Image (spheres, rainbow, N blue to C red):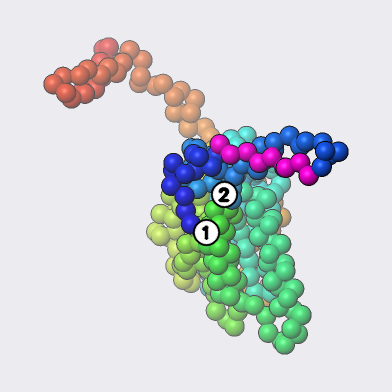
Amino acid sequence: MFLERKEIAEVSKVRYTKPKTSDLEEEEEPKAYYEFFREDDWFCFGIFVRYPYVTGTSIVAIKYKDGVLMASDMGGSYGSTLRYKNIERVKAIGKHSLLGASGEISDFQEILRYLDELTLNDNMWDDGNSLGPKEIHNYLTRVMYNRRNKFDPLWNTLVLGGVKNGKSYLGMVSMIGVSFEDDHVATGFGNHLARPILRDEWHADLSFEDGVKLLEKCMRVLLYRDRSAINKLQIAKITEEGVTVSQPYSLKTFWEFSSFHNPTAGAEGSCWFTIKHGGFFMTFQSLDQ
């Protein structure tokens, strides 16, 4: 039964003291950790306050004619500080699936442990069958939704691709358990910058070479625009033959734009000012010719 706010405030004032059972037994000091409620919370019992610490940025994945391609960089940011530069965020799962993750790295490692147990249990049946990408995608959806309902979410957005029985599969799961399938997906900042490129240039008959070029174009835009992206990436592919993850490499970039060298060009002698008139704010620019 949920408590009202006044009742919570009253409970928060209660301290637990172990009663004396003998004159020879020393009296125990009150313990603050027996207090389960706080006055500033509606219902605080079992609440977990957790935030991501070391995070990875965007994952971009597409279907192509032979399977699925997935790209990620190898950066791990401690807050806004680029702390690690060799984190692999794309992993093979079983025989038919490929998993990529953005978000908290430690939670991604926990998810990989869940999947290791799942695939091990599946292999123990020794029935000649194995979990496909659709089954693993459904499993991850349930895991993420379950943790969300416990108010202890796994701070990741997951991309699951795979090939089984000649059919390519690509889906995504958010940290609150929202999932969907598509021909191309992106997480993080890539959802804003890479998806428009993919909508314009993706088609179902992409070759491997064209698919890699498309992913590199998306990753280059993210490198320019996403402060957490680094120029060290991996591209993984999964086909009927299995999973192949490339060695880390860097993209060729161009930073010699004139506006980079002279960002205030055309701004000398001008200023902006705002005035309030009749309840409205008006902004003007003054130009010194």
> SS for tag 2?
loop
* Amino acid type at mark 2: Phe
* Amino acid type at mark 1: Asn
Look at the picture and state if 55 lies above or below 282.
below
Look at the picture and state if 171 lies above or below 193.
below
Identify the mark at residue 45; answer none if there is no mark: 2
The residue identified by callout 1 is 149
- Residue 226: % across, % down: 52, 41
Q: Residue furthest right?
A: 24
Residue at image point 62% right, 34% down: 81
Camera-side residue of 99 and 220: 99
Camera-side residue of 68 and 53: 53
Give the magenta part as a residue range: 13-21
Is residue 19 magenta-colored?
A: yes
Residue 176 visible to the viewer: yes
Residue at image point 72% right, 67% down: 116
